[in-house]
Amino acid sequence: MLSRIASLVLLAVVVPSAAFQTFLPKISLPFAQPPKQSNAAVEIENQLLTLIESGDKRLDNSAEIASLVAQLESTPSIPRPAIAPEIYGRWRLLQTTNADTASPIQRKAVDTTKFAIFQDIVVAEDDENKLLVKQIVKFSEQNELCVDALASTPAYPVAELTEREGSGKILGLNILGVSLVGEEAAEDVDRPDCRIKFVFDEGNFNFGGFKIPYPVPFRSPLFRDAVKGWIDVTYLSDRLRISRGNKGTTFILKKEY
């Protein structure tokens, strides 16, 4: 048990934040009515969910899953997803690819299917102009790890979140994961407002109300560039989200609320 928790300590992915109930997400730009989801998209989603639920691995490079993901990504979905109202809330991680550029510890942690993993995209409780991406690992109903990242989108811009400069390799080795940088990290011009930039900021273990700080100096200038990242939302519906991260990993998440 302790070894599994130790592996989860470096995972880059509580109960719902009261902020989500207190503050409505800021929608600074006008939105047209999202396109009605096609029957074909619903059917592909159903196939994907059934396939994932029938398996026993959260970390998988299944060709069949990849094919369904590609079909959904080529299907019209909610536009400008990074700032669409549907992006906010809690998402459960269902499946992720086993990318060589992800850190070895992260791959092991995600593959530990015993623990539920969630991602909350919410407004900060203490600042209605601050957007957070909260990575949550639930060890049990009362025990969890929560790592907060400051997020930046056109609706919630953060001046600090400039482009990442380093790939993250240490002495040429993949220890903490390897990020795309430069031209490889350029945003897809055909998918406007699909990127959520973030920088990990703080974290805590919460054991029944007793908090232990997450032992990583996220705010240290020595590490600040290394803890920057981004996710591109390549498909979004009311119940399903597909995202691709800065380390080349594809994530499939299901909306909880």
Image (cartoon, rainbow, N blue to C red):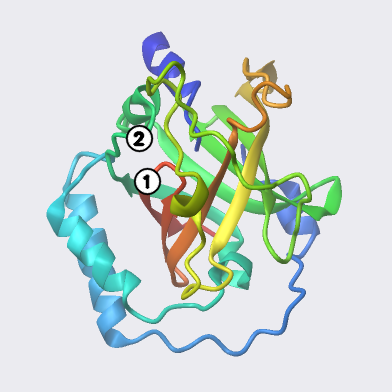
Which quarter of the image is occupied by the C terminus?
bottom right
Q: Residue drawn at (80%, 47%), measured in percent from left and top?
A: 125
Residue linked to disc 2: 101
Q: As shown in the figure, which amino acid type bears the numbered disc 2?
A: Thr
Q: Which residue is mark 1?
A: 248
Mark 2 nearby-residue class (10 Å; few <14, some 14–19, many ≥20): many
> Tag 1 or tag 2, which sits nearer the N-term?
2
- Image location of residue 217, percent across then percent down: 68, 19
Kind of residue sitting beneath label 1: Gly
Quadrant position of residue 152: bottom right
Mark 2 touches mark 1? (CB < 8 Å):
yes
- Is residue 1 placed above or below 56 in the rendered structure? above
Residue 144 drawn at (x, y percent): 55, 28
Name the secondary structure under disc 2: loop
Outermost residue, front side: 183
Residue 128 has which mark?
Answer: none
